Image (cartoon, helix red, strand yellow):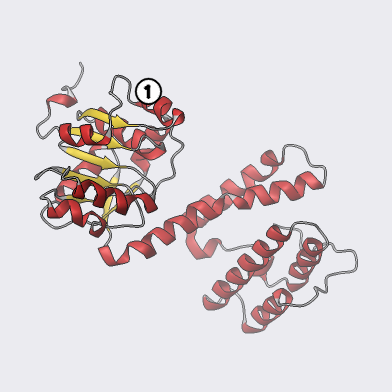
Amino acid sequence: MTGPDPARRPGRLGIGIIGAGKVGSVLGAALRSAGHAVVGVSAVSEASRERAENLLPGVPVLEIPQILERAELVLLAVPDDALPPLVEGLAQLGAWQAGQLVVHTSGRYGTEVLRPARAAGAPPLAPPPAMTFTGLSLDLGRLPDSMFGIPAPAAVLPIAQALVVEMGAEPAVIEEESRALYHAALARASNHLGPIPAQSAQLLADLGVQHADRMLGPLMKASLENALSAGESALTGPVARGDAGTVRAHRAALESHDAPDTRQAYLGMARATALRALERGVLSPAQGEAILAALADGPADGPPDGSPTGPHP
């Protein structure tokens, strides 16, 4: 027996989406699945129009003023730098409507950026997802495992939380003044993750290794799972073991290889790892001093053959 039609639930909204990018289209599809009606979407580029067609079939592509005329909730899914002038510009046009919910997906901003809309009587919400998006339907399956960081005035906080729960995700309240640090934490965990396998794969390819992804995949997946489940106790590798000779050998090998971005990234993360290991007592002061000395400015003094001294990653 099928369950009740989501569209018949109380409190269903007419939703307009400004920005059919990877985030806006997916969240629009998730809200539509929860029974809300998507009344229009703005899509400028060919890619965004195709994305809207795939994830929001049957939804009309409209100009932004038309969307604001029709929508009870407006979802602003635009780049961070475009958000303030968009909100202000629409306020100057008198486009915001009293009682119209305004939601943005920018991790950088809280609700303060929506002040011009709020001045027109449009309650502001800001529940950006702590998730990276592909803009494909597979993102919908990832939402139930994700969290949304929400700042919202107390009067509308339950609405923001309810919308997140309806999409299958979990809400977490992040104070307005902490948004930049919150966003930096997410960017650090997500955006900086991409270069690591790319740089390692390039080094392996330079050595003639084919299918570097198959070599790195199991290692990186296990490392990430261990780090998320065990935290600092999962810290491993030559830095955490205090193997200064291995670190010097790595550095010497990277300095002799034409990959300056990889070398700088290795040195920076190795220093950060050493400092955390020292702070948590994983390394003794003497071990920490030796590791940091191996990473300090100046020529590396690795073993003559340039090989690592330890057998483990």
Of 26 and 40, nearer the camera is 40
* Rendered residue at 67%/82% (across/down): 289
Q: Is residue 171 visible?
A: yes
Q: Residue furthest front?
A: 93
* Rendered residue at 12%/29% (across/down): 9
Q: Position of residue 35 (x, y in %)?
A: 20, 28
Q: Position of residue 89 (x, y in %)?
A: 25, 49
* Rendered residue at 62%/43% (across/down): 218
* Residue 34 against residue 23 in the figure, above or below: above
Of 241 and 143, nearer the camera is 143
**Element under label 1?**
helix
Q: Is residue 221 left or right of residue 49?
A: right
Amino acid under label 1? Glu
The quarter of the image holding the N terminus is top left
Packing grade of label 1 (10 A; few <14, some 14-19, many >=20) is some
Of 123 and 138, nearer the camera is 123
Q: Residue furthest right?
A: 304
Q: Is residue 163 left or right of residue 202?
A: left
**Which residue has dot 1 on it?**
53
Residue 301 picture quarter: bottom right
Q: Is residue 266 left or right of residue 144?
A: right
Q: Position of residue 196 (x, y in %)?
A: 62, 53
Q: Residue furthest top?
A: 1
* Rendered residue at 71%/79% (across/down): 293
Residue 145 picture quarter: top left
- Count of numbered marks: 1
Q: Is residue 237 visible?
A: no
